[in-house]
Amino acid sequence: MFPRTFKFRPIPRLTQSAVFWSYVATSLRTGSALVLLPVILFYLDERELAFWYVLIAVGQMAYQLDFGFSQSLTRSAAYLWAGAPELQSRGLVRAASSSGKPNLSLMGDLIATFRLFYFMLAGGLVLTSLLIGWPFIQRVAQPGDVEFWYYAGAWLVYAIAAGIHFAGLLWAAFLNGINQVHKSQQLFVLGLVINYAVIFAGLWYGIGVWSLVLGYLAMSLVVRGFGLWIVRRKLRAAGWQGEGRMNTALVKTLWGNSWRTGAFSAGAVMTREGPVYLCGVFFPAPVTASLGITMHMIRLVRQLSMVWVRVKIPWIQQKWVTHEIPLMLKVFHQRVAIGVVAYVLGAAGIVFLGPLLLVHARSDAVMLSGIPLALLLVFYLIDNVRSYFAQLVVSANIVPFWRSWLCTGGLAMLAGAAMARYTSLTAFLWTWLILHALWVFWHPVVQAMRLIRQHQTAASDH
């Protein structure tokens, strides 16, 4: 039926597929959250719910305190894995040879330096979380009461878990950089499973908000511990002997683009989170609920469609170093096309199946329809394409559009606030789309084409 040389092994191929595990992680996170939320609402009272949501807000600080270093570390690890002789603050260094042999010496220095750096940042995160939480805990319960120590202890454990989780970002960054995206996603899936298992068990046995705190702690320990073990095993298999020394010059080198990445991320947060925030301030609660649930569905489709390009970024970073531009562009364009098709199919599913899902779920909220829904779908479609080309540019270790994203995000917040206060939701969404279409949407595409021409010229001259 098949030639003897043909080996049909779909299961092993799936287990090594970064796309497959990214879909598993995204589906598990979204699906389990939908199941978990009604359970949490059933078992926790209003005070515990308020306490938990404040904890989540503090937990998000872990990612903001990263200052963009994790993305810089992923790029740096990819360059060194491809054989780059050194690292630069901006731009690329051509590989010393075409063999692609990893630069394990500098990789060891990078690990030793940023392991200490992330440990210090994680400690700062724990202390900051405790200081921020103290006034809130005093409002939840009076000092000296049994409930006070119940909440204070939960806050302390959660702050420690957030610090551990933050330190684990280092190993996830290295795994992605050495082209082990599937391992990183497998680790994330394992952490989510353990987190949800602990939460369900804790709620069942009646330990309240502590079940959520202990679930987050268990996930943080697993992700950090196994991440460190996998990175060490992969590097030792490549010939690394565990050597590495502290080199503060590496922090200065990566800082050159990290702060730009942080500013770029701040602009992206305002771009994507701004509509719900402003709607909650200026529009009635039912309108905010409709916008929130509609954007939640679109974001899920967006995340699933972006997987096709995201998992190839470490490989693309390595091709920048080796100057294999034609091959890189061929794969990139294929992945962008698949991502766009996946988004369009998902958007069609939202239009036709979204209202039915809310009816069967007996939800009081309704989806947006008509022009507002069309504006949101177009906004995120263009945002997807913009993000693809932005990732291509950033993978070359430059962030030329951080000013445009930060300024446009801030301007959209101001203009959106004015429109939301005096006009309808449709006019507000039109303002949001037009402001971003004027500059931010097409700027990364122009930068990507300019960068490609530069590298093609340099490769031909070489």
Image (cartoon, rainbow, N blue to C red):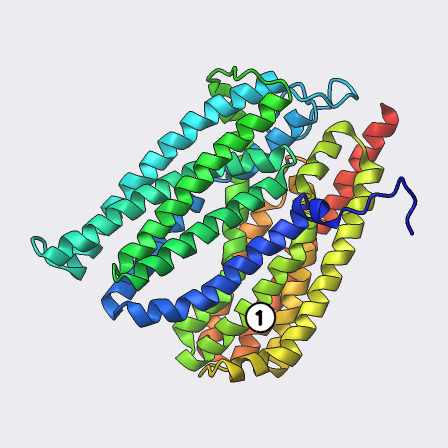
Kind of residue sitting beneath label 1: Thr
Looking at this view, is 90 or 121 the one in front? 121
Looking at this view, is 269 or 300 the one in front? 300
Q: Position of residue 424 (x, y in %)?
A: 51, 81
> Which of the 4 image quarters holds residue 66?
top left
Q: Position of residue 277 (x, y in %)?
A: 44, 66
Figure disc tally:
1
Q: Where is residue 93 in the image (x, y as percent from the top left)?
A: 70, 24
Q: Residue at x 67, y 64 (%)?
A: 381
Direction left: furthest residue = 144
Q: Which residue is drawn at 59% across and 67% down?
A: 298
Residue beneath label 1, please?
A: 431
Left of 115 or right of it: where is 23? right
Q: Is residue 257 visible?
A: no
Q: Which residue is drawn at 69% across and 35% down?
A: 317
Looking at this view, is 119 or 456 the one in front? 119
45 in relation to 226, above or below: below
Q: Where is residue 215 in the image (x, y as percent from the top left)?
A: 36, 51
Left of 280 or right of it: where is 214? left
Q: Residue at x 18, y 61 (%)?
A: 140
111 in relation to 34, above or below: above
Q: Quadrant of the C terminus?
A: top right
Q: Is residue 215 visible?
A: yes
Left of 276 or right of it: where is 344? right
Element at badge 1? helix
How crowded is the residue under tag 1: few (<14 C-alpha within 10 Å), some, or many (20+)?
A: some
